Amino acid sequence: MHVHVIYMSISGNVRRFVERLQQYALQQHCINEDSPLISLSEIRKDTSPIELRSNFFVILPTYTVTFAQHWIEILTTPMHHHLKAHNNYEKCLGFIGAGDASSGMYATTARAYANHYKIPFLTAFESRGTESDVERIYALIKLQVIQKVYG
């Protein structure tokens, strides 16, 4: 079984995290073939939206620009285009956030997406994440997939 993760990585932290997540999934799959593998797709500003045919998870960093006491998230707009195209958002099983926990905006981008699309916000990790974050998030993804498949 494969689980698809689409993500954006502006500074490279999320990319490094998902690569470690994918490697951990491979290790778990070698131990137990029922453990899902993870495939990755990075969404960039020049990525053309395509129709996604299977369920997936989204991992988003938090980047905001402040204008006169209001924050506006502008850097992950390509993800919105990707989710809206072909109603891809209907196959999304959940959002995972990344960011700086010391800022007041921790994981706000993923939370905002989850709220907008009425899809669960699952969890968050800080910066590049720790090994324990990799294990925790893999277990959470695996649980969500099992619940989706077996109800």
Image (cartoon, helix red, strand yellow):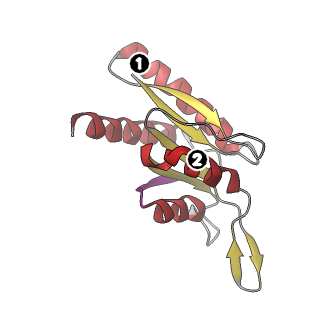
Residue at the far bottom in the pictured view:
68
Q: Do tag 2 and tag 1 residues touch (Cβ < 8 Å)?
A: no
Image coords of residue 89 (percent x, y): 49, 49
The overriding secondary structure of the stretch rendered in magenta is strand
Image coords of residue 18 (percent x, y): 59, 36
Q: Residue at x 36, y 23 (%)?
A: 35
Looking at the image, residue 47 lies above or below residue 35: below
Image coords of residue 83 (percent x, y): 56, 49
Q: Which residues are magenta?
A: 118-126
The first of marks 2 and 1 along the sequence is 1
Amino acid on which disc 2 is placed: Ala
Residue at the far left in the pictured view:
151
**Can see residue 76?**
no
Q: Nearer the viewer, residue 134 or 35?
A: 35
In the image, residue 2 lies in the stretch drawn in magenta = no
Q: Residue at x 54, y 44 (%)?
A: 86
Amino acid on which disc 1 is placed: His
Residue carrying label 2:
85
Q: Nearer the viewer, mark 2 or mark 1?
A: 2
Q: Nearer the viewer, residue 17 or 86?
A: 86
Image coords of residue 7 (percent x, y): 61, 43
Task: Assign a secondary structure to mark 2.
Answer: helix
Residue carrying label 1:
29
